[in-house]
Image (cartoon, rainbow, N blue to C red):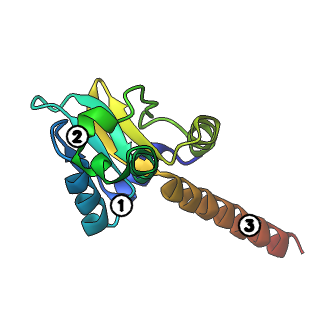
Amino acid sequence: MTTIAAILKHKGYDVASVRPDVTIADVARLLTGRRIGAVVVQDAAEHLLGIVSERDIVHALAANGATALEMTAGQLMTRTLQTATPAMTIPEAMTVMTTGRFRHLPVVEHGALLGIVSIGDIVKARIMEQDQEVDSLRAYVAGAA
């Protein structure tokens, strides 16, 4: 069974992060520039404080108009985070993300942020697992014939 560690090994451990005082306008520019859907918010000691996603920005814009862009990441971030461990399996991650209705899952081990996985990463890994299972079954059937 594929784990989050395998996904991070393949995609890398780079995580876009911002400090809590960064404006939402700057967060939006970072998201656009890196073509990503979320950034983690960390303090100067790199403690994980929260996450800001595209969805958070859209909700803030709908509620506050253009003044939302002047808000800070610390004001807008989701503070109660679900996290994954490297040992978490793909089905476990899918369940956590589906139940919580979010698309980005920070990966933490021993209090340290290791990476982040998106629902796209999870789906891609699951499809690769299924392709391998199909190939194994085809080889088995061909060998048994």
Q: Secondary structure at mark 3?
A: helix
Q: Which secondary structure lies at badge 1?
A: loop
Inspect the image, locate mark 1, and give the three-letter code of the amino acid beneath it: Ile
Q: Is residue 34 visible?
A: yes
Disc 1 marks which residue?
A: 36
Task: Name the residue located 11 percent from the left edge and 28 percent from the top edge.
Answer: 45
Residue marked by disc 2: 72
* Image location (x, y in percent) of residue 51: 34, 39
Q: Position of residue 112 (x, y in %)?
A: 25, 30
- Residue receiving disc 3: 134
Q: Residues within 10 Å of mark 2 (few under 14, many from 20)?
A: some
The answer to whether residue 127 is left or right of residue 11 is: right
Near-viewer residue (43 or 87): 43
Give me the C-alpha separation between circle 2 and circle 1.
19 Å
Element marked by disc 2: loop
* Position in image of residue 49 (x %, y %): 27, 29
Q: Are marks 2 and 1 in contact (CB under 8 Å)?
A: no
**As shown in the figure, which amino acid type bears the numbered disc 3?**
Val
> Of discs 2 and 1, which sits in the foreground?
2
Name the side, left or right, on which 96 lies relative to 9. right
Question: First in sequence: mark 2 or mark 1?
Answer: 1
Is residue 111 rendered to the left or right of residue 101? left
